[in-house]
Image (cartoon, rainbow, N blue to C red):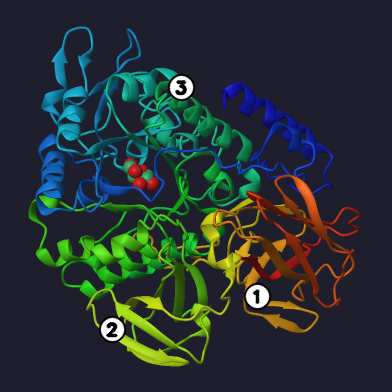
Amino acid sequence: MTVKSRLARLSVLATLSLTLPLGTTFIPVMAHAEVSAADPLKPTGAWSIPQRKQAQTPPMGWNSWNAFRTEIDEAKVMGAAQALVDSGLATKGYVYVNLDDGWWLKRRQSDNRMQIRTNLFPSAKIGGTAGTSFRPFTDKLHGMGLKAGIYTDVGHNACSQAYDLHSPNLPEGTTAEREVGLYGHVDQDIALYFAEWGFDYIKVDACGINVYAPNSDLVKTHAYNGIEPMIDQNAISRTDITGVRRLYDEVADALDKHNPDGDYILALCNWGTADVRTWGKQTGHMWRTSGDITPTWTRMLHNFDSASTRALYAQAGAWNDPDILFIGHGEFDANHLVQARAHFTLWAMINAPLLISYDLRSAPQSLMDIWGNADIIALNQDKGGHQAVIAYATDDVQILVKSLSSGQKATVLFNRTGAPITVNLTAEHLKYLSDQPVQLKDLWSKDTHSFTGETTFTLAPYETRIFTTEGTRRLNDGVFLSEIPGQINVAEDGITAPMPDPAVHRMTGQWSGTRGTGERPAYTGWGGAQADSTPYDQNLQVAGQRFDTGIGILAGSRLEVRNTEGHTRFEAHVGVDDSTLNTGDKVRFLVYGDGKLLAESADIGFGTSVQPLSANISGVKIVELVVRADNRQSDMPLITTWAEAALKK
Ligand code: GLA
């Protein structure tokens, strides 16, 4: 897609926003063909996530930031690369070796060409008209069977130029020479990094459009060329969602242009702001869902929670990114192996990119064994691409279940607390029959275990247990939609006003302590589509009837479901969920197959029992599930339930 076409659609959407009731914000979700811009619920008969060559499974590799911050150099990076190869981690999938902040010297003013800090990267000193080049560096990595990643910012300046002011490795020179970010140079820089230098992966940060306000002390003291902030991390209404997305879309377009073979990864790093948790899948291969992780248990919880409820928003080629791993440091170091294993297991289960960030030249074997657990890596890299779904949740314990392409499942029992806790795992959690045996294999100890009905574990403080499971599926002739989140694209989630997500753990800051008033909910996406839960984290229930499986979604929504296994029937029971506050308006559920209407419900309101809705989907590739509420009288969210929604043989 070209910049022009992306922008044309943005302007259609901007026009649309003028017609919305006062006080509501239109979220520009441009997931689909042009025709649907006028009516976002109109079926397209297409899977609207861009076809991507890379990141069909979550990217794996190494990143310099948590290990070295800006104190990077070639020996450290190549040492990590060599260790990946020598230890066998590379053959297990850890192939991306990613430079983070700190590699740059300046933007040369004669031709705006970026120059590398050759005191840190001696091989980059090639002389001649180019001056410096990362080509020798990427050639070396490629020669080792690895891939190379680079880092930049979408604004003029990077995060280190605001937050690592003590660093000896900050860009140098005049104001313009220190403008190392992409702003105003997207095409030139992307061409340089990919076509000329041969990188395979780029992380694009957002400090440049966040913390460099023209009249701020930072900008004045350091003579930066400020940019009016487009992001307010505390206020979505002061964040220019469309503008932020447009900047990242320009990067995506330049990457398309300079990598005609599609061999690149774009990692969006705007920390869950600007509603990226909703649109990131359209623009990048992965998008950060939160602020930076720190090596503390409670921050790990925070980052995990920012991604773990977003199973329906991730799929092959497009992943939620709760940040790089912090294993090896602080509360996840070799003295805290229970916590380190938990961190790794949780990231694997929610299909997070697995990026080690540790000095691998001297890693203890106990940590290597964590990153190298082949069974757990296999779950993360399963080609089904189904992020784990939360089957049980309290603030203390979570049970997650992930469907695997083998037909098995994986389950995690997660003790979030610092006290021992008893966990009952039931066949129902796994959507298996309760009167049939269930086999478990522990992916750390490799022990096997069998139970019928339920089994009980006592988890140590901070312990996470992980198993693959086999049992008799409750639905023997098909799959529940909540079992295949990777085959679902939330094209429209029905949210009219993006709201911060309160279901993310709020921790005491590592540096702020208890100064100030504490962490507040920040990342929008609250009210998004959910598997086995309503959009606002309630049990699915219609007219007093409780359902333990289904898709919870707001009215005004459209889901695309890929029918990859040749299923022939879609079946569900539909209704307005009892948790709705809008009890007056009526909705209509519609099922489309490759763009054609196959079935629809009557108009249904609050309090009406679920209605069966089924359709023949023989030969259909894309099933679309639409909930319309065309004559709404109220702006209150209208919560609906596709109960027991399933594809059947
Ligand atoms: C931001 C990002 C981090 C890291 C630093 C580098 O904080 O979120 O992941 O890249 O910038 O300065």
- Towards the viewer: 560 or 264: 560
- Residue 448 is marked as 2
* Label 2 lies in ligand 1 vicinity (Cβ under 8 Å): no
User: Which quadrant is home to the N terminus?
Assistant: top right
> Mark 1 falls on what kind of element?
loop
Residue type, label 2: Thr
Q: Left of 146 or right of it: where is 476?
A: right
Compared with residue 11, is residue 41 higher up or lower down, i.e. above or below?
below
Cα distance in 3D space between marks 3 and 2:
50 Å
What residue is pinned by disc 3? 257
Marks 1 and 3: which is nearer the front? 3
Residue linked to disc 1: 538
Left or right placement of residue 600 versus residue 272 in this view:
right
Q: Nearer the viewer, residue 507 or 43?
A: 43
Residue 404, position as x, y percentages in the image: 42, 65
Residue 402 in which image quadrant: bottom left
- N-terminal of the pair, mark 3 or mark 2, is 3
Side (left or right) of 389 relative to 356: right
Q: What's the distance in space between the residues labelled 2 and 1, CA to CA?
A: 34 Å
Q: Report the Cα–Cα distance between label 1 and label 3.
A: 44 Å
Residue 167: x and y in percent read 23, 39
Number of the front mark, 2 or 1: 2
Q: Are marks 3 and 2 in contact (CB under 8 Å)?
A: no
User: Is residue 553 something that shows in the picture?
Assistant: yes
Q: Please say if 240 is above or below 456.
A: above
Q: Of the residues tagged 3 and 2, which is closer to the observer?
A: 2
Callout 3: 10 Å neighbours few (<14), some, many (20+)? Answer: some
Q: How many marks?
A: 3
Q: Where is residue 545? Give x, y as percent.
A: 75, 83
**Secondary structure category for the residue under label 2:** strand
